Image (spheres, helix red, strand yellow):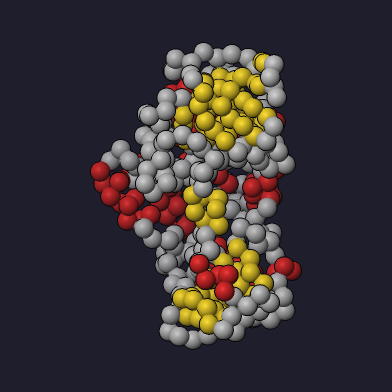
Amino acid sequence: MSTERFDTVIVGGGQAGLATGYFLGKKGRSYVALDAHERIGDAWRKRWDSLRLFTPAHFSRLPGMRIPGAKNWDFVTKDAMADYLESYATRFGIPVRTGHRVDRVSREGERFVVTAGDRRFEADNVVIAAGGYNLPNLPPFAGDLDPGIVQIHSGAYRSPSQLRPGRVLVVGAGNSGAEIAFEVIQTHETTLAGKVPGQIPFPHGSLPFRFGFRVLRFAGHRVITRGWPVGRKMAAKMLAKADPLIRRRVKDLDRAGIVRVGRVAGVENGMPVLEDGRVVEVENVIWCTGFGYDFSWIDLPVFGEDGVPVHDRGVVATEPGLYFVGLIFQHSFSSEALPNRGRDARYIAERIAAGRSTARSSEKVPA
């Protein structure tokens, strides 16, 4: 096995990884980005077919490049966003190697070692930009459902064509659940289970929305940060609750004919049962129950008891040279969202450039 050496290895070729690469390139650093997907942007392409961004195009772009063909307040499709990311990497010469699923990050002496299948990379710095919420959450009783019921997690849902004829139960009334239920009701009788976590106070895309979005974006980017006690307090409260509905409103769901019920509590005779004891007879279940952290492939002692990395603005003090980008509330409430506009990535690139490691060109080292 040959080894390639770089000043920095970025794990992840999505928006966080590309923004980090953009700023490292500006600093003249030697780096490579590794991405598990076959194409840049596939993380977006593989989401459900009708998905559009919730944030306007002007606030969803990466540093240095607008989204082609989109007006400031357009909500672009997920495929348009995927193509934009691919074009972004091409325009700025960001070296993303696709099809490289990283299976281990460790340290040997003074260098980090990143392995992806039969590929080995050594680096002075590693930036984890692969996100953390990528492990589908399923309730422990999901396996008790009748085997004839089609079960799909929202991460694998694409369109109603994946479903059997008959009633659909969408579990989870957050944004993904509301969006998917609104689509599925066009072809199937649909029940949406769970408590709606509220909704934004103005119609999505309206003139009041434009004003309100600017206010919320400023607050989430500048006020609700780890640097302010009030920001940390507000963030703790906001993170404890699901995001309010953004595009779909409760009246939209009701008008569409979606039946809304309480939380699913278990399974009875192979069918979902609600907290009030009612059994829901269905042929399909779509779990819109979110994702959990999975950093099991990072073989370094950098995690707290909750499995979350211990860091300061993405900098891991206990492992010099290890960084994170794109974590939830990494620095501000906007950290994991597109409206962060690469601020966290710029901060990490500046820390790397100011570090003791020296930039060097990629080189092959015999096995």
Residue projecting furthest to the bottom: 278
Residue that appears at 41% across and 36% down: 302
Count of numbered marks: 0
Location of residue 271 by image quarter: bottom right
Q: Is residue 345 left or right of residue 120?
A: left
Image quarter where the N terminus lies is top right
For the residue pair 116 and 192, the one nearer the viewer reads as 116
Residue that appears at 56% across and 70% down: 142
Looking at the picture, does residue 339 appear above or below residue 285? above
Residue that appears at 63% across and 78% down: 146
Looking at the picture, does residue 321 appear above or below residue 69? above
Q: Position of residue 244 (x, y in %)?
A: 44, 62
Location of residue 312 by image quarter: top left
Image quarter where the C terminus lies is top right
Residue projecting furthest to the left: 229
For the residue pair 357 and 248, the one nearer the viewer reads as 357
Residue that appears at 57% across and 74% down: 144
Q: Position of residue 178 (x, y in %)?
A: 54, 68
Residue 148 visible to an observer of this rendering? yes
Q: Position of residue 77 (x, y in %)?
A: 65, 53
For the residue pair 238 and 359, the one nearer the viewer reads as 359
Q: Position of residue 217 (x, y in %)?
A: 43, 47
Residue 203 visible to an observer of this rendering? no
Looking at the picture, does residue 330 appear above or below residue 89? below
